[in-house]
Image (tube, helix red, strand yellow):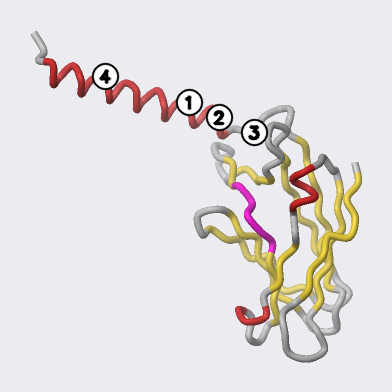
Amino acid sequence: MPTNRQIGFLRAAACAGLLIVASCVADRQDAADTAVTIKLGNAGVEPLRCQLIFGHWVERGLGEIAPGASIRLELMRAKQDGGLYVMRYDGERKMMVENVICGRLENWRESLGQVDLTELRRRPAAEADASCAAPAGPGRVACRLARASE
């Protein structure tokens, strides 16, 4: 006959197992979520280095963007809360997007600017245009979300 302590341990282990299974199922892409494409352009006269920042200090380099050039970011928007994400390489977890940042090639950290993604989180959009540009003198890169459409 198991002791009360052993029964308590087994209950806790069973609950933990259920929570893990539930979290894995909840992390998969929901069919009601929608795709969002952001065209991120360099509107300035010098190259920029940009990164996609996920929660928990995970980042993905987006490379260097030459003046006048742009890149495309393919994201998903959760219908339930508007959260932006990409699926992890194995398709098992949502990688929640915290920010898109760009800075100069020189003094990158001191010149960082960020794209305000609030509009895309608030309302559905299939496409958005964003741009960043370094100022003529010292200072931070300025970024803006110019257009979002369904």
Tag 2: Cα neighbours inside 10 Å, few (<14), some, or many (≥20)? Answer: few
Q: Residue at x 62, y 82 (%)?
A: 110
**Label 1 – label 4 distance at C-alpha:** 16 Å
Q: Residue flagged by tag 3: what amino acid is it?
A: Gln
The magenta segment:
96-100
From this view, report whether residue 118 is shown above or below residue 79: below
Residue highlighted by disc 1: 22
Query: Residue 11, labelled with which disc?
Result: 4
Q: Secondary structure at mark 2?
A: helix
Disc 3 to disc 2: CB gap under 8 Å: no
Tag 4: Cα neighbours inside 10 Å, few (<14), some, or many (≥20)? Answer: few
**Label 1 – label 2 distance at C-alpha:** 6 Å
4 vs 3, front mark = 4
**Label 1 – label 3 distance at C-alpha:** 14 Å
3 vs 2, front mark = 2
Q: Residue at x 44, y 26 (%)?
A: 21
Query: Percent position (x, y) of residue 6?
Result: 14, 20
**Residue 98 covered by magenta stretch:** yes
**Label 4 – label 2 distance at C-alpha:** 22 Å
